[in-house]
Image: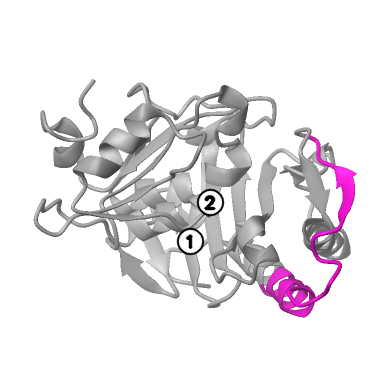
């Protein structure tokens, strides 16, 4: 069993390996971006997402795993389980469609809301790195314990989502950061904060339905918490009660050092 592990991790790791194989085969297919359906959240489902999602369900069925499933493509699948597997089969699908190497599979196992997530796994579909955490057991990258870093304004790096729909608050925060990055993959950017590669991740768009879903953040939420960081929404409200359902969206401020959020000059200021 992996360090900081639980028996369920072995199943989740097998799912990650299978989905990575699918993505590697499909990433050069001319049909990878074909729209094959409308997702449960109302957004288009590309072929690569549908294939990856099908792989996940096949493994659960073959191994007799009775978890319910919540996925951004097919919605809720009731399988008689007492826990829900919250799935983003390909987080960063727009990157995959353009062969940009920033995409993950995000898997979170728990109940009810973000605070009810017990296990989180985020797997880099291009690099093969796996991040995971089990409640109370710390956070890990490929078996090595990870922790957030102390904030130093001379060395700070912020991940901030920018573009035509980003809010003035996002633009203002980007203007104050020492260095700014944006990868287009929420789970990946959050685990970068968890391992100390960055100080925060901020995502806020101008309308609610353009913000993030629970499938984007559930796994990384647990990993970041176990690494010593935390999350708020853009109005500085805790996200722990955010429900495991697709009909809701949220902004997010994911931070590594509480001192950064508390400082009068930091992004945590009202």
The residue drawn where x is 23% and y is 20% is 270
The residue drawn where x is 14% and y is 59% is 155
- Answer left or right for 69 relative to 196: right
* Viewer-side residue, 56 vs 112: 56
Image quarter of residue 172? top left
Looking at the image, is mark 2 or mark 1 earlier in the sequence? 2
- Residue at the far front in the pictured view: 164
Residue that mark 2 sits on: 119
Question: Do the CB atoms of the residues marked 2 and 1 lie less than 8 Å apart?
Answer: yes
Residue that mark 1 sits on: 132
How many numbered discs? 2
State the extent of the magenta-drawn residues as a range: 17-40
* Viewer-side residue, 81 vs 203: 203
Residue 100 is inside the magenta segment: no
Residue 19 is inside the magenta segment: yes
> In the rendering, at what x and y percent does residue 152 appear?
10, 53
> In the rendering, at what x and y percent does residue 125 appear?
61, 71
Q: Secondary structure at mark 1?
A: strand
């Amino acid at each position: 069993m992996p360090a900081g592990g639980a028996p369920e991790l072995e199943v989740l790791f097998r799912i990650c390996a299978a989905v990575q194989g699918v993505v590697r085969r499909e990433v050069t297919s001319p049909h990878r971006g074909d729209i094959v359906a409308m997702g449960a959240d109302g957004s288009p489902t590309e072929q690569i997402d549908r294939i990856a999602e099908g792989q996940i369900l096949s493994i659960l069925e073959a191994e007799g795993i009775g978890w319910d499933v919540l996925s951004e493509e097919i919605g809720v699948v009731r399988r008689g389980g007492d826990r829900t597997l919250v799935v983003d089969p390909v987080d960063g699908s727009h990157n995959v469609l353009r062969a940009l190497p920033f995409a993950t599979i995000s898997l979170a196992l728990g109940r009810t809301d973000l605070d009810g997530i017990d296990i989180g796994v985020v797997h880099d579909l291009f690099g093969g790195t796996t991040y995971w955490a089990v409640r109370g057991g710390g956070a890990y990258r490929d078996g090595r314990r990870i922790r957030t870093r102390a904030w130093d304004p001379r060395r700070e790096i912020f991940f901030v989502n920018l573009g035509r729909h980003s809010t003035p608050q996002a633009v203002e925060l980007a203007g104050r950061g020492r260095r700014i990055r944006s990868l287009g993959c929420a789970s990946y950017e959050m685990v970068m904060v968890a391992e100390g590669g960055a100080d925060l991740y901020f995502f806020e768009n101008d309308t609610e339905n353009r913000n993030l879903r629970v499938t984007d953040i559930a796994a990384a939420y647990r990993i970041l918490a176990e690494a010593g960081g935390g999350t708020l929404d853009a109005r500085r409200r805790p996200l722990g009660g955010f429900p495991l359902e697709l009909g809701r969206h949220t902004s997010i401020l994911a931070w590594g050092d509480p001192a950064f959020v508390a400082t009068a000059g930091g992004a945590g200021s009202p």
